[in-house]
Amino acid sequence: MLNGKGNRDHNFNALYTGTPSPAFPVLFTEYTNSFSALPEESLKYCREDCDRHPFVILADGIPVGFFVLHIGENTDPFTSDKKAILLRGFLVDQKHQGKGIGKKALQILPEFAKGIFPNKDSIILAVDVMNVNAKTLYAKSGFQDTGIQKEGRSGLMEIMEYRLDMGNKDIE
């Protein structure tokens, strides 16, 4: 379990959901951002690939977000670094956006990821070049643009990296 005290008196935590409830994806049916897969789609891939680890972001005990930490061989399209974790499908439900939940989750994520995968030294993510809000949030959370771009399912993606061995420097 990941714990932290967030803004606006919300308690944030993420729980490992290796076998999430079938009703869980229904919580995000109003999510309209085309940049990230819905949890239902992500969970399908997690069931097929044991190197994909799904997590739920909770605020005051309510599921408000989701992400997948992916390790192993199938991260190759995004990084050749075998000591990297690929952050996939990071999203906060539309009803809960603008409350600092995504920011707090990303601030807690490095310590959380290092606790689960102590032999890993970075977190990699791919963000759509058109998703300016997400790129800004990731940069403010300590992710650095690697200068690498890849073609993704919704267009051109920029690869960003957070070095777990360097700490979270220059974040807002």
Image: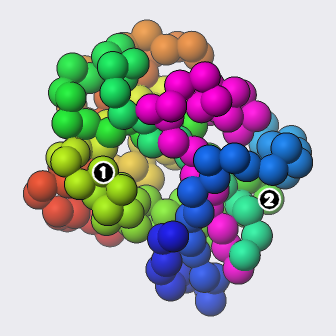
| Identity of the residue furthest to the top in this view | 151
Question: Percent from the top left, x then y, of residue 98?
Answer: 64, 64
In the rendered view of the protein, which quadrant contains the C terminus? bottom left
Dot 2 crowding, Cα within 10 Å, few <14, some 14–19, many 20+: few
Q: Classify mark 2: helix, strand or loop.
A: helix
Magenta region: which residues?
33-60
- Establish if 144 lies above or below 142: above
- Disc 1 vs disc 2: which is toward the camera? 1
Amino acid, disc 1: Phe
Residue under label 2, please give it.
95
Please tell me which of labels 1 and 2 falls first in the chain: 2
The foreground one among 91 and 119 is: 119
Question: Percent from the top left, x then y, of residue 134?
Answer: 49, 44
Residue under label 1, please give it.
117
The foreground one among 36 and 129 is: 36
Question: Percent from the top left, x then y, of residue 108?
Answer: 40, 67
Q: Residue at x 49, y 63 (%)?
A: 105
| Identity of the residue furthest to the left in this view | 166
Q: Residue at x 55, y 82 (%)?
A: 7
Q: Is residue 98 visible?
A: no
Q: Residue at x 53, y 81 (%)?
A: 6
Q: Is residue 47 magenta?
A: yes
Q: Is residue 6 visible?
A: yes
Amino acid, disc 2: Lys
Q: Is residue 37 magenta?
A: yes
- Establish if 46 lies above or below 141: above
